[in-house]
Amino acid sequence: MTQKFLLIGNQFNIALNILITGGSGYLAGCLANFLKGNKNYNITLSTSSENFAKKNKFNVFKIDWGSSVSLDIACKNKDVIIHCAGPNAAEAYQNPHKAFEFSSKVLDNLIKKAIKNKVKKLIYFSSVHVYKTPLEGYLNEKSPLDPKHPYGISKKLAELTLSKYIKNENLDINIIRLSNAFGKPFWNNKNCWNLVVNDFCKQVVINKSIQINSDGNEVRNFVTVNEVCRLVDFIIEKSNMGKLIPFIFNFGGSWNLSVKSLAVLIAKKYKEAYGINPKIIFKKRSQAKPNKRLEFSYDLIIKKGFKPRNNYLDDIKQIFNYVKDNFLNA
């Protein structure tokens, strides 16, 4: 695919106006909290949790996704849009039609308003689940896309929608195919506890045990949400310097673990920290062999200069502490 770059700032360090959609969600909240530490960014959150966002000193704009006028206002005077809004896996499964419409018609309207308002950069979060289910083997950006779950299908549909604008000279788009992110939330969004690492950490602190609702053989790739935040900051910085960033690229971490191995690791770290040996309980037993080895390649963005920091165990300890402070000591 053709690549291009646009300077979205200048040498005089004029602050960039950044809109983050899906502001009440886990990823958007973490991104907003991370990026607000950069004095060169003015952050606006699109969120339904307006009071909490304002309390944390964010500019807030609530988008009506069905309103062309609302989308137009949201894009006005923005330099960068980080698009995190959209149904999660459970919501997509429950209402595939709504998920597909959000990834096509609604997203297309947002892009048109962004171009009209001269937004220079859009960063979209796709998913590793555009590839296949279960995830196995070697996966890079050239691997075929064959999603079966409505969530993966909706992400593929969004990628196709965005691909129509790859040759647009006024809007630079990056699509990040993200693996399984985890880490301490910025605010206590209930959906963040559906993430397997966060869920296991919460279980072990509260129950002193981990229940696995499967045979535990599924292999996944994991990356910390802090790394995702660093990546987004990297993309904006490099784009601001006129550096090329791929239109589509994978992003994950160095952890490729089965769900069972993940539970064992979290239980071990909890025992090391608190001297208690948690039980691991399987809701479903199976004699099936573990999934084939998974290798999720994100070399493409590494070659562009991003340098990962694999501090996974530190992040697990932070989740332990968050759960203790917000659930046990509440």
Image (cartoon, helix red, strand yellow):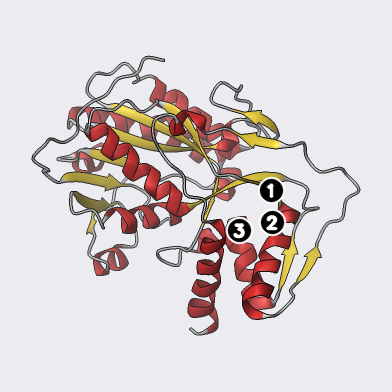
Q: Nearer the viewer, mark 3 or mark 1?
A: 1
Label 3–label 2 contact, CB within 8 A: yes
Can you identify the residue that label 1 sits on? 257
Q: Is residue 7 left or right of residue 34?
A: left
Q: Nearer the viewer, residue 282 or 140?
A: 140
Q: Please state the horizontal and vertical placement of residue 229, each as a whole percent of the image.
A: 39, 49
Number of residues whose C-alpha sits closer than 10 Å to that of mark 1, classed few (under 14), some (14–19) or many (20 or more): some
Label 3: element kind? helix
Quadrant of res 200: bottom right
Q: Is residue 116 left or right of residue 286?
A: left
- Name the residue at 39% across, 43% down: 231
Give me the disc on residue 322.
none
- Name the residue at 25% across, 39% down: 80
Quadrant of res 33: bottom left
Q: Residue furthest left?
A: 12
Label 1: element kind? strand
Number of residues whose C-alpha sits closer than 10 Å to that of mark 3, classed few (under 14), some (14–19) or many (20 or more): many
- What whole-number distance in Å separates the C-alpha atoms at marks 3 and 1? 11 Å
Label 1–label 2 contact, CB within 8 A: yes
Q: Please state the horizontal and vertical placement of residue 228, each as a whole percent of the image.
A: 43, 47
Q: Nearer the viewer, residue 146 or 273?
A: 273
Label 3–label 1 contact, CB within 8 A: no
Q: Is residue 266 left or right of residue 169?
A: right
Q: Amino acid at mark 1?
A: Leu
Q: Amino acid at mark 3?
A: Val
Give me the disc on residue 197.
3
Can you identify the residue that label 2 sits on? 262
> Nearer the N terminus, badge 3 or badge 2?
3
Q: Residue furthest right?
A: 287
Number of residues whose C-alpha sits closer than 10 Å to that of mark 2, classed few (under 14), some (14–19) or many (20 or more): many
- What whole-number distance in Å separates the C-alpha atoms at marks 1 and 2? 6 Å
Q: Please state the horizontal and vertical placement of residue 18, each as a whole percent of the image.
A: 24, 45
